[in-house]
Image: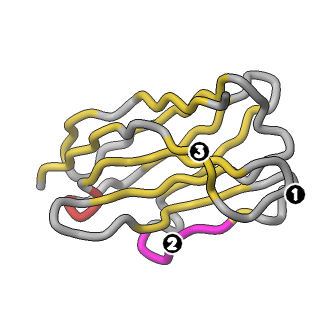
């Protein structure tokens, strides 16, 4: 059974940086598409970034391009989200997601980690 565990959330000021971590247990990240999503209060969950087994297949939401970077570490079975130049509108619960091997749909989700950015 695959389990995802996120960490690294917190409360920061606008302009600060945070690095979220997502560990995958019960499997490996190598052949999966891994992603970060977020959900702000009263809003639907939205895509933030994803990466898969082909390095060129990395994409970001327009709202975070140039500020966020998704990083995969196959050796550690981890995926990270480096968030720089944070804005108040980045405040949300951030979720890590994973597909099954070579799949497109996300089958596994973490419990979420809260990021709060004060202006």
Q: Residue furthest front?
A: 1
Q: In terms of sequence position, does the residue under pointer 3 or pointer 1 come before the other?
A: 1
Please tell me which residue lies in front, 16 or 103: 103
Dot 2 lies on which element?
Answer: loop
Magenta stretch mostly in which secondary structure?
A: loop
Q: Is residue 38 magenta?
A: no
Q: Quadrant of the C terminus?
A: bottom left
Disc ID at residue 54: 1
Q: Is 39 left or right of 30, judged from the image as shown?
A: left
Q: Is 6 left or right of 56, judged from the image as shown?
A: left
Q: Is 98 left or right of 119, judged from the image as shown?
A: right
Nearer the observer, disc 3 or disc 2?
A: 3
Please tell me which residue lies in front, 68 or 28: 28
The residue shown at (27%, 53%) is: 92
Disc ID at residue 96: none
Which residue in the structure is indicated by mark 3? 108
Dot 1 lies on which element?
Answer: loop
**Mark 2: few/some/many CA within 10 Å (<14, 14-19, 20+):** few
Please tell me which residue lies in front, 18 or 47: 47
Q: Position of residue 48 (x, y in %)?
A: 49, 62
In this rendering, the answer to whether 27 lies above or below 29 is above
Which residue in the structure is indicated by mark 2? 61
**Mark 1: few/some/many CA within 10 Å (<14, 14-19, 20+):** few
Quarter of the figure with residue 39: bottom left
Q: In terms of sequence position, does the residue under pointer 3 or pointer 2 come before the other?
A: 2
Q: Position of residue 15 (x, y in %)?
A: 28, 51
Disc 2 vs disc 1: Cβ atoms closer than 8 Å? no
The magenta stretch is 59-63
Q: In terms of sequence position, does the residue under pointer 2 or pointer 1 come before the other?
A: 1
Q: Position of residue 28 (x, y in %)?
A: 78, 31
Q: Quadrant of the N terminus?
A: top right
């Amino acid at each position: 059974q695959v389990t995802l565990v996120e960490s690294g959330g917190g409360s920061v000021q606008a302009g600060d940086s945070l690095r979220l971590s997502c560990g995958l247990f019960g499997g490996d990240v190598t052949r999966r598409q891994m992603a970060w999503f977020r959900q702000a209060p009263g809003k639907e969950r939205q895509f933030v970034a994803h990466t898969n087994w082909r390095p060129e297949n990395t994409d970001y939401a327009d709202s975070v391009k140039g500020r966020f970077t998704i990083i995969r570490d196959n050796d550690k079975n981890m995926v990270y989200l480096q968030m720089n130049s944070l804005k108040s509108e980045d405040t949300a619960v951030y979720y890590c997601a994973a597909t099954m091997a070579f799949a497109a749909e996300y089958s596994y989700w973490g419990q979420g980690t809260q990021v709060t950015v004060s202006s």
